[in-house]
Amino acid sequence: MKIKQSGFTLLELMVTVAIVGIIASIAFWNSSDMLEENRAENFLLELKRNISYARSQAASTDEIVVICAAQHGEVKNQNDNMRCRNRWDRNKIIIVFIDSDNSGHYNKSTDSLLRVMEKISLEDKVKFTGNSRRLRFNTSGRITTNPGEFVFCPNNGTDNNKALSVSQSGTAFYLGDSAKTCG
C-alpha cells in the first residue's frame, strides 16, 4: 500500500518565492515615486490652505497678513523676532502672521502669529518664482508683492515636481505636475 504525501516540491517553492520577490521589488520601486508625489502634493495643498486662510483673514480683520519662510531655529525657540528669509527651503518653516507694525517681519510684541507649517525636509526643495521673500495680503485680500509659482521638488530632483500658482488677487491654484525645477 502506497502512502500519498502532500506538500510542495523544492522547485515549486523556489518559483513561488521568485515570483513574490519580483512583485515585491516592482511594488517597492513604484511606491517610492508615489511617496514623492504624495509628499509634494500634500505640502502644496497645505500651503494653498494657508494662503487661502491668510487672504480671508486679511479681508475679514482689515489687517495686513504675511506668509513667509522663517528659520527653523527661530520658530522652534519661539524667538521674539523672526525675519522672512530669501529662500523658502533649507531648514525653513513657513509662517502666517498679522503684521501690525507693517515691518514685513514677525515681531512678537506687535504682531500675531496665526499659523506655522511643518518644517521642510532637508532633502526637498521649494522655490518661489515671485522674486519676493514674502506674500503680503492687504486689507482687501489682494497680494501687494509679486505673484508667482511655488515649485516643490522632492529629493531635489527633476521628477515628481509639483507647482502652485498665486495670482495678484491672492488666489492660489494647485497646478499639479510641473516641468519646472528648483535649481
Image: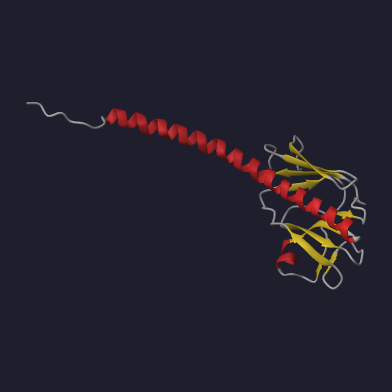
Task: Residue 59: name its quadrant.
Answer: bottom right
Residue at 91%, 60% in the rendered image = 62
Q: Is residue 179 above or below residue 169?
A: above
Q: Position of residue 167 (x, y in %)?
A: 87, 43
Q: Is residue 124 above or below residue 180?
A: below
Task: Residue 13: name its quadrant.
Answer: top left
How is the rendered protein coloured?
secondary structure
Q: Is residue 92 above or below residue 16?
A: below
Q: Position of residue 118 (x, y in %)?
A: 69, 57
* 74 or 43, nearer to the observer: 43
Q: How many marks?
A: 0
Q: Position of residue 166 (x, y in %)?
A: 84, 44
Q: Position of residue 139 (x, y in %)?
A: 92, 57
Farthest residue, direction left: 1
Farthest residue, direction bottom: 109
Residue at 58%, 40% in the rendered image = 32
Farthest residue, direction top: 1
Q: Is residue 43 left or right of residue 81?
A: left
* 132 or 98, nearer to the observer: 98
Task: Residue 113: name its quadrant.
Answer: bottom right
Q: Quadrant of the N terminus?
A: top left
Residue at 27%, 31% in the rendered image = 10
